[in-house]
Image (cartoon, rainbow, N blue to C red):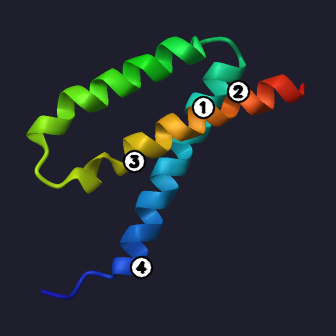
Amino acid sequence: MSDLDTKAISAAIAGFLACHVLTCRFLVKEGVIDRDQFIAYLETAMEDMRPGIEDQRALFPLTQLIDGVRKSEVDIKIQ
């Protein structure tokens, strides 16, 4: 069995995460999703999952998603 290419795996995960963040930011910007409700939902979901997750780094993508959606507010106010 060959070794895993950690740089390639990291890049794939980053790309996957970026797609999710951009999709959610678009949905918020277009008014499909209420930004404040969505952020509250994600934060609650993250806190509900936290006790069952041994390695808290697993929640990093969710934290990044929340931060990305929060930053969409800046984009909306600039327009």
Disc number lying in front (1 or 3)? 1
Q: Eyeballing the image, is 76 above or below 21?
A: above
The alpha-carbon separation of the residues under discs 1 and 4 comes to 28 Å
Q: Residues within 10 Å of mark 1 (few under 14, many from 20)?
A: some
Q: Residue at x 32, y 22 (%)?
A: 44
Disc number lying in front (4 or 2)? 2
Disc number lying in front (3 or 2)? 2
Q: Nearer the viewer, residue 61 or 9?
A: 61
Q: Is residue 73 left or right of residue 56?
A: right
Q: Position of residue 2 (x, y in %)?
A: 19, 88
Which numbered disc flags the more N-terminal residue, 1 or 3?
3
Element type where label 4 sits in the image: helix
Q: Nearer the viewer, residue 61 or 54?
A: 54
Circles 4, 2 touching at the beta carbon (< 8 Å): no
Res. 61 mark: 3
For disc 1, the marked residue is 70
Which numbered disc flags the more N-terminal residue, 3 or 2?
3
The alpha-carbon separation of the residues under discs 1 and 3 comes to 14 Å
For disc 4, the marked residue is 7
For disc 2, the marked residue is 73
The alpha-carbon separation of the residues under discs 2 and 1 comes to 6 Å
Which numbered disc flags the more N-terminal residue, 1 or 4?
4
- Tell me the quadrant of the picture where the C terminus can be found: top right
Q: Residue at x 71, y 22 (%)?
A: 29
Circles 2, 1 touching at the beta carbon (< 8 Å): yes
